[in-house]
Amino acid sequence: MSPTATPKGAASLRAHDVKPQPPTRGPRAKAASLAGWVDDRAGAAKPMSYLLKKVFPDHWSFMLGEIAMFSLIILLLTGTFLTFWFVPSAGRVIYNGSYVPLKGIPMSEAFKSTVDISFDVRGGLIMRQIHHWAALMFTISITVHMFRVFFTGAFRKPREINWVIGTILSLLAINEGFTGYSLPDDLLSGTGLRAAEGFMQSVPVLGSYLAYFVFGGAFPGEAIIPRLFTVHVLLLPAIIIGLFTAHIVLVAVHKHTQYPGPGKTNDTVTGYPFMPVYMAKAGGFFFIIFGITALMAALVTINPIWLYGPYDPSPVTAGSQPDWYMGFADGALRLFPGFFEFHVFGFTLSLNVFIPSLVVMPLIYSIAGVYPFIESWVTGDKREHHLLDRPRNVPTRTGLGVMAISFYLILFFAAGNDLIAIKLGLSINDITRTFQVMLFVVPPLAYWVTKRICLSLQRRDHDLVLHGRESGRTVRTAEGRFFDVHEPLPEHERWTLVQHETLTPLQPTATVDANGVRRVGTRRERLRARVSSFYFADGVHPVSPAELAAARHDASAHEAVETGQDSGAQDSGAQGSSAQDWVGQLHGGADERPETDAHASHEDGEDPGPTAVR
Amino acid sequence: MSDHDAEPAEEPRSQPSSAARLDHRLDHSPGQGHIEVSGGMPERFTDPGLPPHVSRSADLDETAARRAERQVAALFGLSMMATVMFLIAYFAIDQKTYRFIPGIGQANLSNIVLGVTLGVSLLCIGLGAVHWAKTLMPDTEVTEDRHPQRSSDEARGEAVETVVAGGTASQLTRRPLIKYMLGGALGLFALPLVVQLAGSLGPLPKADLSTTFWRKGMRLMRDPEMTPIKASDVTLGSVFHVMPEGIDRSAHVLEEKAKAAVILMSLDPAVITVPKERDWGHDGIVAYSKICTHVGCPVGLYEHRTHHLLCPCHQSTFDVTQDCKVIFGPAHRPLPQLRITVDADGYLVAASPFREAIGPSFWERG
């Protein structure tokens, strides 16, 4: 480059272009020259080494998202295989393949080709079953991954966008699953489509038009199978892959969250580099997931459509159930009472179908999607969070999460009310009514119980830090008093229990300003203060060094303790040590003794003599 | 500190393990951060840093490392063997061989062997790689710095500047005519696409949902045998799945079946409580649409002792003695009744088409 100031513009670039340096001679020159060839054309060296050096923290719960990612890859792979034999057509044919019970039965080409994949394509059944099992793994791992992200607060700033993307992905995944299992056109899935058509008809005003547009006319029609096929293999996968890519890119941009612990800070990420550790671990994990899916597909039959037979609108099998991820919607449909259908001015408003089938699912997902924004409004916290919360340290959020899960699970189990009735020999009517009641009773209860459990766990942490662990050793003092020896927590273990911060409720601001004029927006602030108090009013504060010092009566620290001193003495009663190395570790037998004596004995560092005993 | 001093001594701090303790931080106006207040000692513990590294046996002992190496290699070797077995099984095992497998029962041998060998070959690669990573690859933690997502003020300013400058350079703001016309054009361009799609996806329903294949005088045929039913053959308590005569020759068999399916039951006329039901039947033989008024599943389960019809999809229960009124479940409307009679030969026939739309509710059904 010339030392003088270069004129700006394209011309200067040409004039002063840097000539590529010849690769240096060395043992790795050959590999370097190949990499150099790529780098010359793609400029890949810098991003490549950045990615290879990227650090990922280690925790089992971070594998849940990986399971979803790998299941998606398995789905794409096996799904592509299936398209080579599947015929997405409702055209009628007479079956004449190798599965004897169906011989001579008229069916759609879609059903026939699925039976052929299962019986006449070598290894076809294993691919079909891997595909279906992987779909179940995909949806369940997304769900559990979502739970993990929720309960650890990983959705907080800056990851709100990724939470929303994940929510959409989850919604798309279950619909992708539905379109997939509807394709074989068997009796079970056809009944599902029949119900889906009923859902569309229930849309106020436009219902019948919507149903006729989607099905290309009267149900079942010949259009729905090819349309579902396009949606299943092209439209939804394209959107899912696009959003999934954005999801992963954002994970890389934000860098992975990590659990709190010694050495883990909000400004760093600690773990292992992608090259080589995570390449082996995550790459290996892909094969493990694929392997397990293949074993399940080999040993456990799934969706044996040849037993259900081809779709016919007239027969139906008892115990018709969707795949698990549609269970909650089906359960909602079973629980929603019929009296929500209204007949007004010669029109029918079928809310008993419309709400559970077409409103509940988007509503649940919308609530999930906006949750991070609600919480950040409540906390007023606009900082970036890269350290995860331990669920117990955020009792209200954890309670709300369990409440949502219990609501979901009741809907899910309600979808099996007939099976429960048969298996347990109970009345279906009683079971359904019980579920209807439980839907309103259990979630608040689940919230309350969870919150209490979280607070108890926090107090347990609190006590553990203050009083350490019971060592199982008992010490007898000179005057015959017995004490348990508690071992203080090692510093590294203690940090995990005291690192968090508790938020306090926001205080409602004055409703009038200094001049006695009503302030604008105070109602909003009061609401916010109320919600904030709902969230944070009963937090347990982490132990502070002063409290610990007070609890242990550490001679060197007790001067500094003011209010904490009394508290520690009342609470722990750690007194009357007989040796310096047990200072603050002896518990019990202290209640009758005044606190002041305890300190005195500590300072002596000797056996408490009769003077110390009242 | 200042807060602390200001507060009375019996501040809840005296009970560290009690639940209702106030935090020491006071926040207060929205948008402001929380202010930390410290006591005489540091308010919070300090991070002790990463715990000391514990070396694995393979790091310290070359024999252990060798053993790990052999284990990893053995897993990869096992994977290769399983792959070879898959290939052999693919060609050697006939697709139609069934064998008894303990715990599974009669099963397709090819499926099981292919699946298990594939699974083992994949699983061993995975287990080998993970074992390798856990025993031999470096396990010293690496720490990487994070940077706030927010760009520098400079960069933000530049981005805004670029957008504004671009807008100005395009003269978009100076020439509102272009702006409005562009807005109009962009607003409208999607319409042709939407109209093409919405307009061509399917026909309008018209009266399609309100009519069925049933016409007056059509015989009730057993489904799927398609044989007519003589009234005298219908014994008390029996139930028939019924389709209209000639439906199998219609141009759209499935679509017509989806609306025309009927269930025929024979009851003691004395248990029928609704006169209309008795009148529309024949001597206690009544015919109802089999399509559930909830979301359209076939109402296939008839309990002839209680005279209840149950939909297996969502458990709507209809009482046949009360004109198929809903007595339980999420459906609202009774199943529509098909008026029947007998023809000259004594066969059951429809006395009229359905008088109302069958199946799930829709807005304009009335």
Image (cartoon, coloured by chain):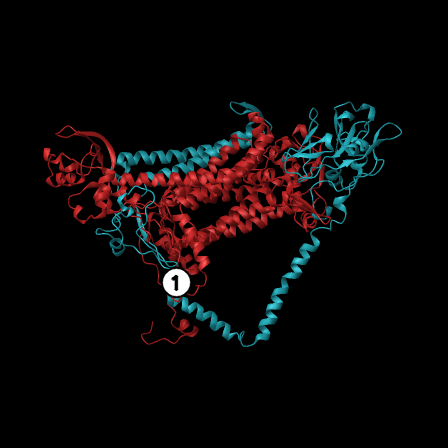
Count of residue discs: 1
**Rendered location of residue B105, percent (x, y):** 55, 23
> The residue tagged with tag 1: helix, strand or loop?
loop
Against A605, residue A428 (above or below) is above
User: Which chain, by letter, is cyan?
Assistant: B
Residue furthest out toward the right: B344
Q: Chain of mark 1?
A: B
Up-down relation of residue A367 to residue B81 (above or below): below
B194 and A156: which one is in front? A156
What amino acid is at disc 1?
Ser
Q: Is residue A245 left or right of residue B366?
A: left
Residue drawn at 44 percent across, 69 percent down: B160
Q: Which residue has dot 1 on it?
A: B151
Chain colored red: A
Q: Is residue B264 above or below residue A2?
A: above
Question: Residue A131 placed where, x, y %?
Answer: 54, 39
- Quarter holding the C terminus of chain A? top left
Residue B96: quadrant of the picture: top right
Quarter that holds the N terminus of chain A: bottom left
Q: Residues within 10 Å of mark 1 (few under 14, many from 20)?
A: few
**Residue B246 relative to residue B117: left or right:** right
Q: Would you say residue A249 is visible in this rendering? A: no
The spot of residue A366 in percent (x, y) is: 52, 50
Q: Quadrant of the rendered structure where residue A424 is?
A: top right
Report if residue B76 is visible in the image. Answer: yes
The image position of residue B13, as x and y in percent, is 27, 46
